[in-house]
Image (tube, helix red, strand yellow):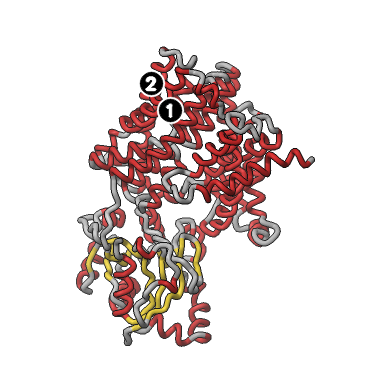
């Protein structure tokens, strides 16, 4: 019994040690370190772990399914829902641009694979075509987030291209495996059967289950020891994997579609569930899969085959050349610098290419030596692509001015604009009507730039030195407010406040991740605040003194990693809270700062201005 757990102990210890060992080499993805650790402890070097360990094989298979599941879960459908509402020239539409890029990728990858086949490296060009067509969504998204480009036009285009490449490649690999195993038969239609339960479950939950007593019971059981939503998500993943295997379909598509389904039925309130699933996957199962990939890696086959030495540099060259050339249509919407940088970032391959190579090895369409070359290509491209992107498109550190954007022109919108202006905020309006724009200008407010009354166009034309700190959707029409929330999200405005006239529509608004203000619901809370803490209410509402509460971004690299007690804060300021992603931190002296933290501070106006300048200062 004990011996069965020794390999698992070794692997879990490595999964713990690798991130610590790589903490000083942040350019190197942790996944690459995990694969390298697997090579070291596997038969290629130390021989501590053998490829046929049954316990590790099962856990690695679960990790593989978890990886595909979380890839599907990453798709933000509220973001995609807002895209069709935007008007673009054909090659400026991110979906069409991503589709064209992927089509060109397939053509170029097939031509390269044909060359590999004629050179005798591979017996079949089709699987290699799909392997070379992959992109690592798990690298593209973090890089864009780190650079705060995810909501930019370039970021949107790259995100859609990576999503399409991941999804379509997974689908095509599933079709290829079915054809390879069963030939052109009725079984190929079974691939589409996987989409039927996805559509049925989504329709049933959206139409009949959400809002019922059973749904409320599930909400009540979401915390503590029950964790019912986490259990349900895992049950869906395993169910789709079992269904895929029963249909003779590759499990990657089943696991991916289960993640897509969970993403579809999730709401912003389910964000903690996503964090728990991420913790389970990336904290345990997925590292086991990548370490197992290293254990399976046959270094001797690579070293003893001179053709593999030649194939490896050719694969690296092909990996970058294919995506860079296929991304040339980006030039219709972006500069040459952005186009080339985008092509280099899309050249990153990691999770899916390793998974596809493992499938090809199992089918016998690629050899051990070729598989080794592919795994090494994944490691190198995952390391070099983000570095090349940042080198070609360096971050410009300039202090940007926060702007409050108000959508609407009614009395409420104008009064809110006046309140914000009295507190020293820069305010811009967007009104869907010409009469509303006239009223706004008569009140002395600036409009969003551009001739159009469309919010999206105004946000796109915002001067480079300004950024939207918050958008307030205060129009009297709930439909227009909802569309404004969607467009704001599409353009990367995450601080969105919406006035909702009909409380029954709250679920629609919350699906856009907007914070809602429904007077009928929050009147009690406001009156309670006035009664229980009059001083705080007075502080938040008064404009007669020089005290204020502001939330400001931390963009000074020199302060990153420092504890609050070690920072020279301006006098008459008090840090109330730190918002880091989805987490709100109650600060104390040993709380450390990180780049892009949102810091809420109480203080006098002049001190707050000095602090804002300090936090925005470049290194």
- Identify the mark at residue 112; answer none if there is no mark: 2
**Of residues 304 and 102, the one drawn nearer to the viewer in this rendering:** 304
Q: Position of residue 532 (x, y in %)?
A: 53, 85
**Of residues 282 and 550, the one drawn nearer to the viewer in this rendering:** 282
Helix, strand or loop under label 1: helix
- The numbered mark, 1 or 2, whose residue comes first in the sequence reads 2
The image quarter containing residue 407 is: bottom left
The image quarter containing residue 436 is: bottom left
Q: Residue furthest front?
A: 46
Note whether 403 is above or below 167 in the view shown: below
Asked if the residue under mark 2 is in contact with the one under mark 1, i.e. CB atoms within 8 Å, the reply is yes
Q: Position of residue 534 (x, y in %)?
A: 47, 87
Q: Is residue 520 visible?
A: no
Helix, strand or loop under label 2: helix
- Report the side of 517 relative to 325 (left or right): right
At 57% from the left edge and 25% from the top edge, which residue is drawn? Answer: 189
On the image, numbered disc 1 is attached to which residue?
132
At 30% from the left edge and 44% from the top edge, which residue is drawn? Answer: 391
Q: Position of residue 582 (x, y in %)?
A: 49, 61
Note whether 253 is above or below 574 in the view shown: above
The image quarter containing residue 273 is: bottom right
- Report the side of 360 relative to 601 (left or right): right
**Of residues 161 and 185, the one drawn nearer to the viewer in this rendering:** 161
């Amino acid at each position: 019994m004990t011996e069965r757990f020794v390999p698992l102990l070794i692997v879990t210890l490595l999964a713990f040690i690798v991130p610590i060992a790589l903490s000083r080499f942040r350019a190197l993805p942790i996944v690459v370190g995990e694969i390298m650790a697997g090579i070291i402890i596997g038969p290629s070097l130390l021989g501590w772990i053998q490829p046929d360990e049954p316990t590790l094989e099962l856990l690695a298979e679960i990790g593989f399914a978890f990886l595909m599941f979380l890839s599907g879960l990453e798709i933000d459908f509220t973001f995609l829902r807002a895209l069709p509402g935007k008007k673009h020239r054909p090659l400026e539409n991110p979906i069409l641009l991503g589709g064209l890029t992927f089509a060109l990728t397939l053509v170029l990858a097939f031509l390269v694979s044909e060359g590999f086949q004629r050179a005798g490296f591979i017996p079949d060009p089709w699987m290699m075509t799909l392997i070379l067509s992959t992109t690592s969504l798990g690298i593209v998204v973090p890089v864009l987030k780190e650079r705060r480009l995810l909501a930019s036009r370039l970021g949107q285009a790259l995100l859609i291209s990576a999503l399409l490449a991941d999804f379509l490649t997974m689908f095509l690999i599933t079709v290829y495996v079915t054809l390879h195993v069963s030939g052109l038969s009725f079984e190929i239609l079974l691939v589409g059967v996987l989409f039927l339960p996805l559509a049925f479950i989504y329709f049933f939950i959206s139409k009949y289950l959400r809002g019922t007593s059973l749904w409320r019971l599930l909400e009540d059981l979401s915390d503590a020891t029950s964790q019912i939503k986490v259990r349900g998500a895992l049950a869906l993943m395993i169910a789709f994997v079992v269904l895929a295997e029963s249909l003779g379909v590759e499990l990657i598509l089943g696991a991916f579609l289960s993640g897509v389904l969970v993403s579809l039925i999730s709401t912003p309130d389910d964000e903690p569930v996503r964090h728990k699933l991420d913790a389970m996957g990336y904290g345990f199962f997925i590292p086991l899969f990548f370490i197992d990939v290293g254990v399976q890696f046959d270094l001797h086959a690579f070293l003893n085959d001179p053709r593999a030495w030649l194939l490896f540099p050719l694969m690296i060259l092909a990996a970058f050349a294919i995506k860079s050339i296929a991304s040339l249509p980006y030039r219709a919407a972006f500069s040459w610098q952005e186009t080339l940088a985008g092509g280099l970032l899309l050249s990153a391959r990691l999770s899916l290419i390793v998974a596809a190579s493992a499938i090809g090895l199992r089918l016998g369409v690629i050899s051990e030596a070729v598989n080794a070359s592919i795994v090494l290509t994944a490691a190198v491209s995952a390391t070099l692509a983000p570095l090349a992107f940042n080198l070609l498109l360096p971050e410009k550190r300039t202090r940007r001015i926060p702007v409050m954007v108000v959508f609407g022109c009614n009395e409420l919108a104008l009064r809110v604009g006046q309140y914000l202006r009295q507190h020293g905020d820069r305010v811009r309006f967007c009104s869907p009507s010409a009469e509303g724009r006239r009223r706004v200008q008569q009140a002395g407010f600036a409009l969003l730039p551009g001739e159009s009354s469309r919010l999206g166009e105004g946000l796109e034309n915002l001067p480079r030195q300004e950024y939207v700190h918050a958008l307030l959707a205060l129009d009297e029409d709930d439909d227009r407010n909802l569309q404004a929330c969607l467009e704001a999200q599409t353009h990367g405005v995450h601080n969105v406040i919406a006035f909702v006239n009909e409380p029954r529509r709250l679920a629609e608004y919350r699906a856009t991740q907007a914070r809602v203000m429904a007077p009928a619901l929050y009147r009690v809370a406001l009156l309670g605040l006035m009664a229980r803490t009059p001083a705080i209410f007075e502080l938040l509402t008064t404009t007669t003194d020089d005290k204020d509460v502001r939330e400001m971004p931390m963009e000074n690299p020199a302060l990153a990693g420092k504890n609050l007690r070690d920072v020279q804060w301006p006098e008459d300021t008090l840090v109330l809270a730190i918002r880091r992603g989805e987490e709100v931190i109650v600060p104390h002296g040993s709380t450390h700062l990180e780049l892009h933290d949102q810091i809420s501070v109480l203080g006098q106006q002049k001190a707050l201005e000095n602090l804002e300048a300090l936090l925005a200062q470049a290194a």
